[in-house]
Amino acid sequence: MSKQHGRGHGEGPSQRQLRVAEEVRHALCAVFAREEFRDPDLHGLHVTVTEVRASPDLKHVTAFVSALGKDLTDGQLAALKRVSPFLRREVARSVRLKFAPDLHFQPDTALGYAMHINEVMHRPEVQRDLATRKEEE
């Protein structure tokens, strides 16, 4: 397969996938900023869309989300799934594509993981080990 379509093995996303994913991310951020949800599990929730990945055929996108740096609960992720038809319509209005993509939501755990690593790095025993290693060099 050609690299242009991004379907070969070991190839990253195509420029088109990247462009569409970023447009969808902006559209979702705009909807989440307006907080127009009637679902009680989403009331008052500030959703952050950290990344969007589009499938090669652009019919599916996966949005990685968090709640102001916190992991979303299972209930909140289920609520996002419930409101996905509304979100899909909003994305379709903003992003001009032949088909409105199906939206899938995944928790973005990168920030939580980074905070955990930061906590570990500041533990006294780790600081001691790092200082000892530095002295040995």
Image (spheres, rainbow, N blue to C red):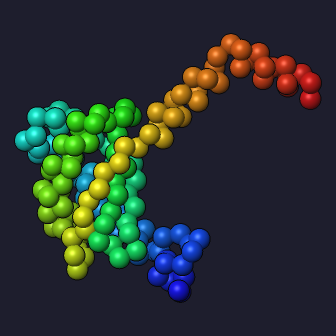
In this rendering, does residue 28 appear at all? Answer: yes
Which quadrant is home to the C terminus?
A: top right
Q: Residue furthest top?
A: 124
Give 75 or 114, whichever is nearer the viewer: 75
Q: Is residue 24 above or below residue 57?
A: above
Q: Residue at x 27, y 51 (%)?
A: 29
* Residue 73, percent from left and from top: 29, 33
Lateral position of residue 11 relative to residue 134, left or right: left
Quarter of the rendering containing residue 72: top left
Q: Residue furthest bottom?
A: 2
* Residue 97, percent from left and from top: 24, 76
Q: Is residue 59 above or below residue 76?
A: below
In this rendering, does residue 19 appear at all? Answer: no
Give 111 or 9, whichever is nearer the viewer: 9
Q: Is residue 7 above or below residue 50?
A: below
* Residue 58, percent from left and from top: 33, 73
Q: Residue at x 78, y 23 (%)?
A: 130
Lateral position of residue 6 relative to residue 71, left or right: right
Lateral position of residue 113 relative to residue 37, left or right: right
Q: Residue at x 26, y 42 (%)?
A: 77
Lateral position of residue 30 relative to residue 17, left or right: left
Q: Residue at x 46, y 33 (%)?
A: 112
Q: Is residue 48 above or below residue 86?
A: above
Q: Residue furthest left?
A: 38
* Residue 66, percent from left and from top: 34, 40
Number of numbered callouts drawn = 0
